[in-house]
Amino acid sequence: MDTITTIFQWSLLAVLSASIASSNGQCDDCDSITQTIESLEIDVERRYEAMLIDEQGLFDSPDPDHRSWEGHVQKYLSVQSELRTQIALAKSKGCHVSQSAEDWSVEPPPRRPFSG
């Protein structure tokens, strides 16, 4: 086999490999986007649980340092909105999105803390 044939075969193999990778629906950005989604999902879940516990008692009486239940709700919704944005980006690029992330992206904030 001559050098030109070998180079052609390797080039063809590279093109086919790239084609197979793109047909699997994964782009180069998927790892980064998935990590962002996982981080946002954890943040939403953590905020949800913190609101259920309400250690600071903000549901019944706002903190004098301007912290409030409504502030928690607004931040929850803001992070959740960013989660939905990243999920849409992931889907547009063919990246896998976990069902858990999908679920947390639409879970409404708690109406009130858990009262035991």
Image (tube, rainbow, N blue to C red):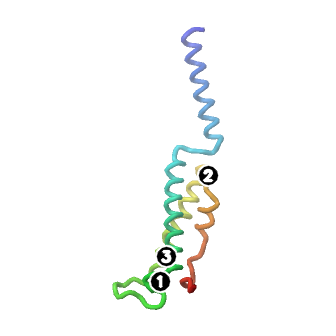
Which residue is situated farthest in the top direction here?
2
Q: Which residue is mark 2?
A: 96
Element assignment for label 3 = helix
**Residue occupying the point 57% across, 80% down:** 110
Between the C-alphas of marks 2 and 1, the distance is 33 Å
Residue 88 pos. (x, y %)? 58, 59
Name the amino acid type tagged 3: Ala
Q: Which residue is mark 1?
A: 70
Dot 1: within a 10 Å radius of its alpha carbon, few (fewer than 14), some, or many (20 or more) residues? few
Decide which of tag 3 and tag 2 comes sooner along the chain.
3
- Find residue 84 and report its image quarter: bottom right
For the residue pair 114 and 33, the one nearer the viewer reads as 114
The relative height of residue 92 versus residue 25 in the rendered view (above or below) is: below
Element assignment for label 1 = helix
The N terminus sits in image quarter: top right
Decide which of tag 2 and tag 1 comes sooner along the chain.
1
Q: Which residue is mark 3?
A: 50
Decide which of tag 1 and tag 3 comes sooner along the chain.
3
**Residue occupying the point 56% across, 83% down:** 114
Residue 10 pos. (x, y %)? 57, 21
Residue 37 pos. (x, y %)? 53, 58
For the residue pair 56 and 88, the one nearer the viewer reads as 56
Which residue is situated farthest in the bottom direction here?
61
